């Protein structure tokens, strides 16, 4: 998983370098742009900006999946310009849970479809 504070970038990678091809690609498990706790990305922030902890952007998973799914690496900005602003006056962060999976495994549903 990775976390990026508002106005920074989340970097997801399934290789030792962007040019490496180890046959592994990103599979997004979950994602949220907002705030779900009072500690993450709170350093130096006034309490009023980190006290709301029920902030979720409903399309976070879709946006991150569209940007990163199936790629060996990707970078996505944790910003209101990408995700809109689910909670005004709250300092947000992007949390992404992902796994690195074999490229071939992503083809299994398609191959199963061909057999039917």
Image (tube, rainbow, N blue to C red):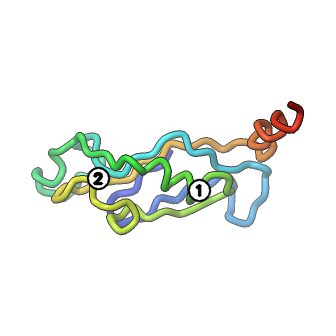
Residue at the image position 48 percent from the left and 55 percent from the top: 63
- On screen, residue 37 versus residue 10, left or right, reads left
The image shows residue 90, relative to residue 106, as above or below, that is below
> What residue is disc 2 on?
41
Residue at the image position 31 percent from the left and 50 percent from the top: 34
- On screen, residue 17 versus residue 9, left or right, reads right
Q: Outermost residue, right direction?
A: 115
Quick one: label 2, few (<14), some, or many (20+) residues within 10 Å? Answer: some
- On screen, residue 97 versus residue 69, left or right, reads left
Residue situated in front as seen by the camera: 25 or 63:
63
Quick one: label 1, few (<14), some, or many (20+) residues within 10 Å? Answer: many
The image shows residue 54, relative to residue 75, as above or below, that is above
Residue at the image position 89 percent from the left and 33 percent from the top: 115
Residue at the image position 68 percent from the left and 64 percent from the top: 18
**Coordinates of residue 55 in the picture (x, y in percent):** 26, 45
**Coordinates of residue 42 in the picture (x, y in percent):** 23, 52
Q: Quadrant of the C terminus?
A: top right
Kindly check if marks 2 and 1 are in contact, taking CB atoms under 8 A apart as contact: no
Figure quadrant of residue 112: top right
Disc ID at residue 68: 1
Instruction: Give the label, 2 or 1, closer to the camera.
Output: 1
Secondary structure, mark 2, is loop
Figure quadrant of residue 31: top left
Query: Mark 2 or mark 1, which has the lower sequence index?
Result: 2
Secondary structure, mark 1, is helix
Residue situated in front as seen by the camera: 70 or 43:
70
Q: CA distance from mark 2 to mark 1?
A: 23 Å
**Coordinates of residue 83 in the picture (x, y in percent):** 37, 60
**Coordinates of residue 44 in the picture (x, y in percent):** 19, 58
């Amino acid at each position: 998983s990775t976390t990026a504070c508002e106005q920074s970038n989340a970097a997801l990678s399934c290789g030792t370098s962007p040019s490496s091809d180890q046959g592994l690609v990103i599979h997004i498990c979950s994602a949220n742009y907002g705030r779900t706790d009072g500690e993450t990305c709170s350093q130096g922030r006034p309490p009023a900006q980190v006290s709301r902890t029920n902030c979720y952007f409903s399309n976070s998973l879709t946006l991150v999946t569209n940007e990163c799914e199936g790629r060996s690496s990707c970078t996505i900005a944790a910003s209101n310009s990408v995700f809109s602003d689910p909670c005004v006056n709250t300092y947000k962060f992007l949390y992404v849970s992902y796994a690195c999976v074999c490229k071939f495994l992503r083809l299994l549903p398609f191959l199963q479809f061909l057999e039917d």
